[in-house]
Amino acid sequence: MNYIRTLHTRERVLDEYREELIAFQEEFCKNDNNPLQLLEIEELKSQVNTVIDSLSVKCRLVFEKYLYEGMSPQEIADEQAISVNTVRVHIKNAMDHIKLQLGPTAGILFLFLYGRL
């Protein structure tokens, strides 16, 4: 029962992120040739990179492999010789830190910039 509730909650949150992402993308597409908007996106990427750089070395390594290289938690765990749960904790800690620094819309920002949470 808890498992089903957890899945339902997760799906609801993902649906909310998807809706916000679609709205964000629609707004972006209206002005996709706007130099100011392109500059704002580069500034957002810079802010994200600054926050990622402030993570601990191990957390940053795991998160960069997950975010930039598209590796799964299992692949990262195998490569780094750590448990999958440790990888998941590093990813969660990184996202929590980013949300704390960039605000609650960080998830939407990540979906837009990198295509994954």
Image: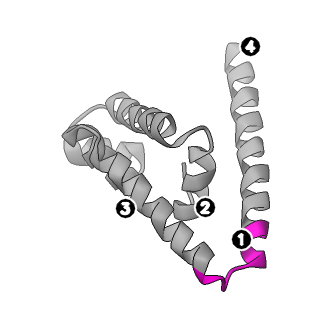
Amino acid at the residue labelled 4: Met
* Quarter of image, res 55: top left
Task: Name the one closer to the observer, 27 or 62.
Answer: 27
Magenta range is 26-35
Residue 49 located within the stretch drawn in magenta:
no
Quadrant location of the N terminus? top right
Residue 67, horizontal then vertical, whole percent: 42, 55
* Quarter of image, res 84: top left
SS majority, magenta: helix
Determine the CA span between mark 3 and mark 1.
Answer: 25 Å
Q: Of callouts 3 and 4, which one flags the residue occurring earlier in the amino acid sequence?
A: 4
Determine the CA span between mark 2 and mark 3.
Answer: 16 Å
> Residue at horizontal 34%, vertical 48%?
52
- Element at badge 1? helix
| Foreground label between 2 and 4 | 2
Residue 16, horizontal then vertical, whole percent: 77, 42
Compared with residue 75, is residue 23 higher up or lower down, i.e. above or below? below
Q: Of callouts 2 and 4, which one flags the residue occurring earlier in the amino acid sequence?
A: 4
Q: Of callouts 2 and 1, which one flags the residue occurring earlier in the amino acid sequence?
A: 1
Is 13 left or right of 78, judged from the image as shown?
Answer: right
Q: Which mark is residue 40?
A: none
User: Residue at label 2?
Assistant: 112
Determine the CA span between mark 2 and mark 1.
Answer: 10 Å
> Residue at horizontal 62%, vertical 74%?
37
Amino acid at the residue labelled 2: Phe
